[in-house]
Amino acid sequence: MRHLKAINRKARTIDQLNTPATPDVHDQPDVVALQGNSGPRVPDGPHVPLGCSFVFAPGWEVDSSGSTAGLCQPVERDLYDCYVTCFWPIHVPDLLNHAPDWTNKCAAAQQDWRKIDLIFP
Amino acid sequence: MLAGVMSAGLMSSPARAQRPDTTGFEITDPLVLRKCGGCHKTDSTNRVARLSYLRKTPEGWEASVRRMASLNSVKIDPAEARSIVKYFANRQGLAPAEVAPGRFETERRLVEYRYAADGQTERTCRACHSLGRVILQRRTKSEWELLIATHRGYYPGSDFQAFRRMAPPAPDSAPQPHPMDQAIGHLSRAFPLRTPEWTAWSATMRPAPLEGAWSLAGHEPGRGAFFGRMVISKVPGTDDEFTSRATYRYASGGALVTRDGRSVVYTGHQWRGRSTPAGMPPDSSMREVVSVEPGWQEMSGRWFRGGYDEFGMDVKLTRVSPGAAIAGVSPVGLRAGSRDVEVTVFGANLPRAATAASVDFGPGITVTRVVRSSPDEMVVRVNVDSSARTGQRDLFAGGASLRNAVVAYSRIDRIKVTPQSNMARAGGVRVPKMFAQFEAWGYVNGADGKPDTDDDLNVGTVPVRWGLEEYGVTFKDDDTQYVGALDQRGFFTPNVDGPNPARKGSRNNIGDVWVVATYTPEGANARALKGRSLLIVTVPLYMRWEPSRTAP
């Protein structure tokens, strides 16, 4: 699944996940390796408008600055990576558990997005 | 590896059989043992592996049973599932005080929630879902551990996303636990299986005696306050299932609405119902998530519907007693110097033949006549002195009273748009749209003359002009052209889902915009006042964990 160029933090995180080799410090967006004490995500993050009941963390609905500007766009382009890596299991069906056949009806979400099914687990 | 993780804890270990673990709850229900016992083993003290060591909301138990069917191939029919969920919600549920901080979750509210007790746990556990899911559970330490093991087994990415620290530790730093270990430690201290709240509640818990008449008061964003009553009857042959008929009217006018509903009350206090307005199709039905206050005199919660549960109303129910009671007044704001204003007082057992002299709004407000009066509604006309002092007024009428029933004011100082930030989702082609409703409220700054202080007074919703403005995040931001439309009722309809070839990079019709309300006060040279709210219009959800089926 490396046909995507990582354009945002979410995608870059997936890239890292798929790259078991020693991480290249220069590729890391959040200089985590240099600070050495935080997880891969932005520590506390700026104010995200909705810390709420259907939402949570910067990533799916908003980027780390609380905006939609940095999201991987269009979302259809990122869907299958999320699906295959189970990356947003609350937002996107996952290959491993709930939706092994999710992509059968459409090979490329960006073109065939009208065939994407909602999954009710 | 997956199978190993997944079956963890299901067998009662031989060690446990010799030295019984009485922390857990005994389970002897034949249906549970028959349906679940094949994999969840019972020990010599009637403790069942895993099941005895958890407490959850009805929604929480429902999610577990649903997962047993979807991922663990358990065959179970809907009636059995309902009965098992009820059994667990009643025997291993949550006390009212334990549910209170997480009510936003079951009521499906879009709120800004901060979990203050442990910042690291908050960050770790809200990476994918709301922390509401977490704080509405009670477990033993080993169950918190197994929960995390389950996450890691099903969703291997979770290690990377949240649970483990990926970067090597700094050379001179002390060893640090992985975020998941810190979360397990915190959660097992903060949300243990046994608590004083549950011990106390389970000792007094009984089927809630709710039959009878209740006075209903509520607020629906976009339509405003409504008042009426609800009559609750028991479903014959049960002691915790009810039918209900609510009749209410919006204070802003309109016909009487009647809704017929059916509900189950779990754990003696968690009302889960569904009601449909008379003569309307079932898809206009609303789910009712309401908490019964201990003592059975009051209930409050939210009724909601919509693709993302975004259409809803706050409701409050108070048991009707033989005496008169006032539930609310409309309008709330009374401007100094205004004459002949029609004011409606809503309540129960109000006097049929009230006189102007028997309705007292306090200094500066004179009731000139009673237009009509019935037990539920009294309509009066009032004059407000031009020198009436700004402030709240208690109302006394027909032997009943309501504190802070109205606000006298001379000038609106500012406008506040609620919610102060909101979310919508593109949809309409392949996925539902998530709509958003805004309201504009007038505020008086109060005695200190300063905005946003405790003495500010809310004078109610005010008529405004609505518009969208760019929330500048990127250079040449053009979101307002694509995200959707806001009408003059403050109702936002998002644009369609799917890539938009007209946008750079085929972006979806998403973006960040300000919703701006402009209020023009009465009076010749009054200055227009503006209020605004940040609206995030974002991508859909493709996985739908809701809707819950805990209501009939």
Image (tube, coloured by chain):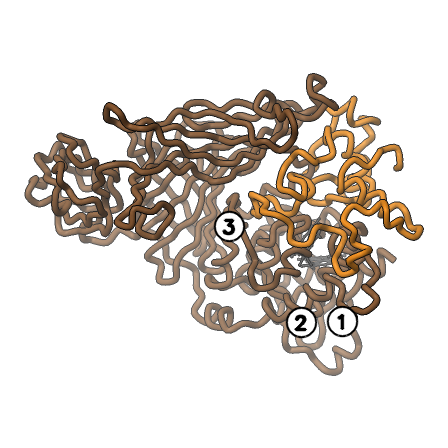
Chain colours: A orange, B brown
Q: Is residue B393 left or right of residue B209?
A: left
Q: Chain of mark 3?
A: B
Residue type beneath disc 2: Arg
Q: CA distance from mark 1 to mark 2?
A: 9 Å
Closer to viewer: mark 1 or mark 3: 3
Asked if labels 1 and 3 share a chain, the reply is yes
Asked if labels 1 and 2 share a chain, the reply is yes
Q: Which residue is mark 3?
A: B104
> Where is residue B436 drawn, in percent x and y?
50, 32
Q: Which residue is mark 1?
A: B12
The answer to whether B357 is drawn above or below residue B476 in the figure is: below
Residue type beneath disc 3: Phe
Q: Residue at x 42, y 23 (%)?
A: B488
Q: Residues within 10 Å of mark 3 (few under 14, many from 20)?
A: many
Q: Residue at x 65, y 35 (%)?
A: A68
The answer to whether B478 is drawn above or below residue B422 in the figure is: above
- Image quadrant containing the N terminus of chain B: bottom right
> Where is residue B503 drawn, in percent x and y?
69, 20
Residue type beneath disc 1: Ser
- Between A57 and B354, the one lying in front of the other is A57
- Between B177 and B277, the one lying in front of the other is B177
Q: Which residue is mark 2?
A: B47
Q: Earlier in the sequence, mark 1 or mark 3?
A: 1
Residue A98 found in image quarter: top right
Q: Are marks 1 and 2 in contact (CB under 8 Å)?
A: yes
Asked if labels 3 and 2 share a chain, the reply is yes
Q: Are marks 3 and 2 in contact (CB under 8 Å)?
A: no
Q: Earlier in the sequence, mark 1 or mark 2?
A: 1
